Each structure stands twice: as structure tokens, then as C-alpha cells.
Amino acid sequence: MGKCTKRAVLVGCNYPKTQFGLHGCINDVNTIKAAILKFGFHESDINVLTDAPGSSVLPTGANIRDALNRMARDAKAGDVLFFYFSGHGTRIPIFQPGQPFKQDDAIVACDLNLITGRFLFGFIYLF
């Protein structure tokens, strides 16, 4: 088997200047990045999206989906893929007539768009 590549998408949403503001999510991403670098990840294979002032790519719903899709698209058999999110989460009701009440988990991007567990689990099951 060939050499595996370790790829990561790290997302930190502090939601500045909103009523939903947090104060440690970008710090969390920086800490996780430092940790995974010690486990053989290379800086060039880590995609960091934060809403810190001056960030080049904000963690909007579209940008998070795009980053995950690119990571999956570039993956080869045996690669290690890692996704980390620090920010708000929520639950969304799923209404299906004649079915018991269910909820889907979601993460909240900095533009307040939701990325549901169905998308995330669909991404995981690609492998």
C-alpha cells in the first residue's frame, strides 16, 4: 500500500458582532491544528476556515461544504480525513407524515446557514 495523505478541514466560528457571539472557537481550531501537526499532518493539507478578522476564507455554509467536498474529492484509498468544528450547533425538526417526530443535528456556519448531520454523515459514508 502506498503512502497515505492526512487531510483536515478545521472550522472555528466565533460569530463576531452578532447576538450569538462566542469567544474561544478560533482558539480551539488553533489548538487542534497544533495537535494534528504533531500526528503527521502537513500544513499544506490542513484547510482552516475561521471568522477571525482578516481571514481569507470565512466559514460560511457554502465554504464549509466546498472545503469538505474538495477534501473528499482529492482523497485516495488509505488517506486519513479529519473534520473539526467549533461553534454553535442546533437541532432541526424533521416532519414526515405518519412517522414519529425526529430531529436532525446541524452545525451553524458564520453566515447562520445550517449544515445538517445528513450532509456530514453522507460525507463520512463516502469512505
Image: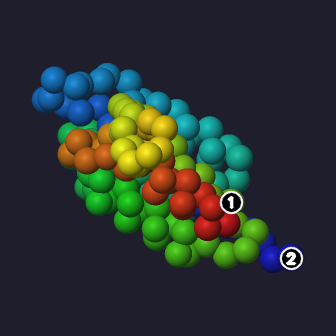
Q: Say which residue appears at 22% left-offset and 25% top-offset.
A: 20
Query: Tag count in the figure?
Result: 2
- Mark 2 surroundings within 10 Å by alpha-carbon count, few (fewer than 14), some (14 through 19), many (20 or more): few
Q: What is the x, y in percent for residue 23? A: 31, 22
Element under disc 1: strand
Mark number, residue 1: 2
Q: What is the x, y in percent for residue 22? A: 30, 24
- Mark 1 surroundings within 10 Å by alpha-carbon count, few (fewer than 14), some (14 through 19), many (20 or more): few
Amino acid under label 2? Met
Nearer to the camera, 103 or 37:
103
**Side (left or right) of 65 relative to 34:** left
| Quadrant of the frame with the N terminus | bottom right
| Quadrant of the frame with the C terminus | bottom right
Q: Which residue reaches farthest front? A: 98
Q: Say which residue appears at 39% left-offset and 34% top-offset.
A: 91
The residue carrying mark 1 is 80
Q: Quadrant of residue 93?
A: top left
Amino acid under label 1? Val
Can the viewer see residue 107 in this picture? no
**Side (left or right) of 79 relative to 113:** right
Distance between mark 1 and mark 2 Cα atoms: 14 Å
Can the viewer see residue 80 in this picture? yes
**Side (left or right) of 101 relative to 35:** left
Element under disc 2: loop
Q: Which residue reaches farthest right? A: 1
Q: Which residue reaches farthest left? A: 17
Q: What is the x, y in percent for residue 58? A: 26, 51
In the rendered image of this protein, does residue 49 appear above or below residue 104?
Answer: below
Q: Quadrant of residue 14?
A: top left
Q: What is the x, y in percent for residue 53? A: 21, 40
Q: Say which residue appears at 31% left-offset and 46% top-offset.
A: 114
In the rendered image of this protein, does residue 66 appear above or below residue 91?
Answer: below
